[in-house]
Amino acid sequence: LDCWKTPAASPVFLAQRRVRELLITPDQKMIHTAFSSRLSLPQSLTSKPRAGSSGSGATRRGQLHLIAAKKNKRKEERKAQKRAETKALLEKRDEDKEKETSDTSALSGPQPYEATATVMQSLTICGSYKDKTGEKLLDGTILVQEAAKALWNAPFVCASHDASDVFNYGNKAALSLWRLSWDEFVGLPSTKSAEDDESVQSERRELLDRAAKDGYIKDYSGIRQTSDGRKFKINGATVWTITDKDGKKTGQAVRFDTFSWLRDDGEEEEMIVCEGGEIVPKKSIAADASSDMKEIPSAVEVAEASAAVEAQAAEVRRLKEEDGLDNSSPAVQAGVASLMEKKAVLADLEERIAAAADA
C-alpha cells in the first residue's frame, strides 16, 4: 500500500495501479478501490477545468479585453482615415477656390477707371465741365472716390484728348461706340474718330478751335466713324476745353447721350445710351415707355372697380339682413369670395397708379 501514497497524477502511480489490477484478486480490487477513493485528490487539482467553469473566468475576461481593444483600435483607425479624407477634400476645395479666384482675376483684372491716372483724369473732366458750363457732369451727389466709377458707367458717351489731340480717356459707352478696348483707345489720335476726309477733318478742327476760344460748345452735331468704319451722327453733343490752374489748354472733352447710325440706304437709326453705358435703339426705349403708360389704369377703370366692390358688399349684406343667412351659408360664402376678388382687383389698380406716380 506504500505505492498508493504516490501522487495520483504521476505516471509512476498510474503504472503501478495498472500492475496491481493485473495481479490482485477481485476481493483485493474492491479493497484497493475503497482506499483509492479516500486518498484521491480533488478534481480541481488533478484535472483541467471544464470550459465555462469558474476557473476559466479570468481567461475569459482577458479575451474580452483583447477583443475590445482590437475593436477600439479599428474604430480609431477608421476615424483617423475619415479625418484624413476630410482634410484632403477641404484642401482640394481651397485649392480650387484659389485657382478660380486667380483665373477670374487674370481674366477680368482691375477696371481701367481704377488706375490712379484714370481717376485723376476723371476728376479733371468733371471739374472742368463744371467750370466751363456751370453745370454738373454727373447727376446727384457723388463722392470724390466714387466719381471715376460713376463717370465710367455714366448714361452718356464721354471722351477726352490731351493738348496733342491724343485720346487719354474714354468711358464704357465711348469704348463700346468706337468698338475699341481701353488700351486701343487711349493713345489713339483723336483725328481717327472721324473719317479721313479733308472736309470732315477741317470741320472737326474748326469745332475744336471754337470750343477752345469760347470755353465750350453745346448742341453740336457732326459725323464720326467707328474703328471699323461704320459712320454715325452725333446729336446734341457738348464739347469743352480743359485748362490748368493758369488757364492753359491741356485738352478737350466731349459728352453726348444720343447718336444715329447712318445706313447705306440713307436711313438713320437713333440710338441712346442707358445707365451702365449700354447703347440701345431709342425706339425700344420709347416702346417700353409707351407700354408702361398703357399699363397705368385710367380713372374710369378705378371707378368701375370701386363700384363693383360696393355693389358686391351690398349684396353680401342683403343675404344676411333680408334673407337671414349667416356666414356658414354657401350663398354668403360665395358672395364673400366674390367680394374679396373685386377688392383685390381694385387694390392692384391703385398700386399701379401709385407706382406710376413714383416713377
Image (tube, rainbow, N blue to C red):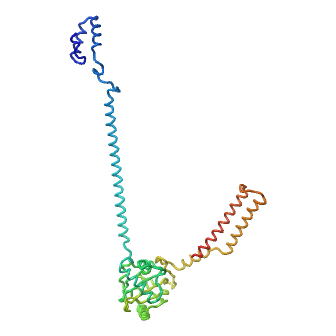
Quadrant the C terminus occupies: bottom right
Residue located at (46% from left, 76% from top) = 276
Examine the rendered structure and indicate whether residue 171 appears above or below residue 247.
above
Residue 241, image x, y percentages: 41, 90
How many marks can you see? 0
Residue 146, image x, y percentages: 42, 77
Q: Residue 74: which quarter of the image?
A: top left
Residue 355, image x, y percentages: 59, 73
Examine the rendered structure and indicate whether residue 35 appears above or below residue 245.
above
Instruction: Choose between 235 and 115: the one closer to the eye.
Output: 115
**Residue 155 horizontal side relative to residue 320, left or right:** left
Instruction: Choose between 122 and 181: the one closer to the eye.
Output: 122
- Residue 90 seen in this snapshot: yes
Residue 55, image x, y percentages: 32, 26
Quadrant the N terminus occupies: top left
Residue located at (28% from left, 15% from top) = 40
Q: Residue 331: which quarter of the image?
A: bottom right
Most extreme residue toward the right is: 322
Q: Residue 28: which quarter of the image?
A: top left
- Residue 263 seen in this snapshot: no
